[in-house]
Amino acid sequence: MGSRSKKKQRNHITHPSEHMGNKEVQTITETGTLGKFFKLKAHGTDVRTEVMAGITTFMTMAYILAVNPSILSAAGMDSTAVLLATCLASFLGTMCMGLMANLPFALSAGMGLNAFMAYTVCGAMGYPWQVALLAVFIEGVIFIILSVTKVREAIFNCIPLSLKKAVSVGIGLFIAFIGLQNANLTVGGATLVELVDFREDFHTRGICALLAVIGTVLMAVLYIRKVRGSILIGIFGTWILGMICQGVGLYVPDNESWFSLLPSFSMTDFTALSKTFGGCFDVDMSSVGIFNFIVVVFSFLFVDLFDTLGTLIGVASKADMLDKDGKLPAIRPALMADAIATTGGAVLGTSTTTTFVESAAGVGAGGRTGLTAVTTALLFMASMLFAPIFIAIPSFATAPALIVVGFLMFSSITDIKFDPDNYTEAVPAYLCILAMPLFYSIAEGIAVGVMSYVVINLFCGKAKKINPIMYVLTVLFVLKYIFL
């Protein structure tokens, strides 16, 4: 007994580091601190998967760090200031999403909304960017109120399950189409869209399109073979192939539209943020027409509301996060995180911050909890230090991720019943799916789906199953198309 006790004691003393190592590992696994906070085990995931998913989401969104400053600079804003504001707003919104809602969704400056601000509000309507940011700030405050009063949650829950599945499918086609554009595989033509001629401008557009095709195949094969981090590996693999092509002369930068694929290691001027910070409060309202200003606020409000709802519905549906009634349990904190991000982003100096459809890339990589979002948020913060490197990720490298994830979201179409007895559900779903890529808008797709659902069911004698809020939404959509 005594010898066995001493032997046991010697073994204990001999391996203290092993004991501490296990304890340390315990704190970061699904049963430790992170695991308990984010409920990793309950969601069937682990730290490694969540972190990889967060990195994947960031990599597919990193283009916004280059695109947003480019677009908003057309409104007279300083590019570096917009870059820093975009990083901070993305960090704020995505971190709130992860910690408040425990969802794997990331937020940043919304594409389309930034163009609306730069080219319509500041361009066509002639308002200074400070006025546009004030409109965004007011929109964010309204969203906070709507989130607290459950209005946004009620809108989310009133949409029938068939339309929620359709939104997922429509977003899949939409982001796949964006991927084809970013890959330079589609160009405008007599038929509106046609395949690029690989031989034309081969050393720029042509080779980039070819690399995107290779990247898509690589990513698809890795995903089908269940390689962990397949989407992220595909992004880096395609980028490395691009750098090799530049090294051997197949890709030739022209310093105008086709930049070098090699990352820059220069630093960012952090003092530039002062040029936009608080600019939304430096406005002379006497020079602003109140009616036109209200129209601008409502336009931001409408697009952001339904883009966000569409993204939450689509990505959550694909990740099996909706309950049996088609509701997202954490919808209220998710909407609040979105509203806080928009309000904070306006103060920092960027256009509307919204939930990004590219979050689907992280979900496709296995992300199921807020740890994915927290990882993405930290990378947005880090990108302030290394922005030139992150900006160097070419669009043809991230485009395959959008195409592959588009396929994953499109697979939700099998959940929609297309038999004749279910046509009152199927036809609106079909129209919703069709509208998103063709109208190039998630919000417009939802509008078409909601309006057609109400009209078709009303005239087919199934008015009882229509939620009263759906009638209200239909009227608002009609008024929007008449007056805006």
Image (cartoon, rainbow, N blue to C red):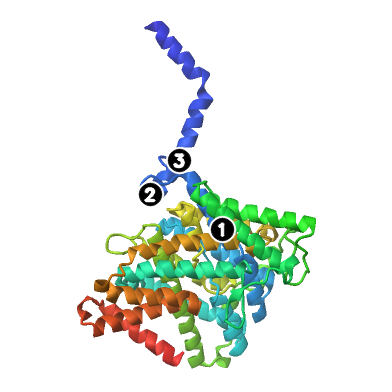
| Residue at (41, 55) in percent of width and height | 102
Closer mark to the observer between disc 2 and disc 3: 2
Q: Quadrant of residue 273?
A: bottom right
Task: Tell me which amino acid carries mark 3.
Answer: Thr
* Residue 138 shows up from this direction: no
Q: Which residue is mark 2?
A: 43
Residue count near mark 1 (Cα–Cα under 10 Å), binned few <14, some 14–19, many ≥20: many
In the rendered view, does 65 fall on the left or right side of 305?
Answer: right
| Residue 406, x across and y down, in percent | 49, 63
| Residue 433, x across and y down, in percent | 41, 73
Foreground pick, 224 / 348: 224
Label 1 or label 2, whichever comes before in sequence order: 2
In the rendered view, does 414 fall on the left or right side of 25?
Answer: left
Q: Which residue is mark 3?
A: 29
Residue count near mark 3 (Cα–Cα under 10 Å), binned few <14, some 14–19, many ≥20: some
Location of the N terminus by quadrant is: top left
| Residue at (60, 61) in percent of width and height | 398
Label 3 or label 1, whichever comes before in sequence order: 3
Q: Quadrant of residue 157?
A: bottom left
* Position of 5 relative to 104 (above/below): above
Q: Secondary structure at mark 2?
A: loop
Point out which mark residue 58 bears.
1
| Residue at (58, 72) in percent of width and height | 350
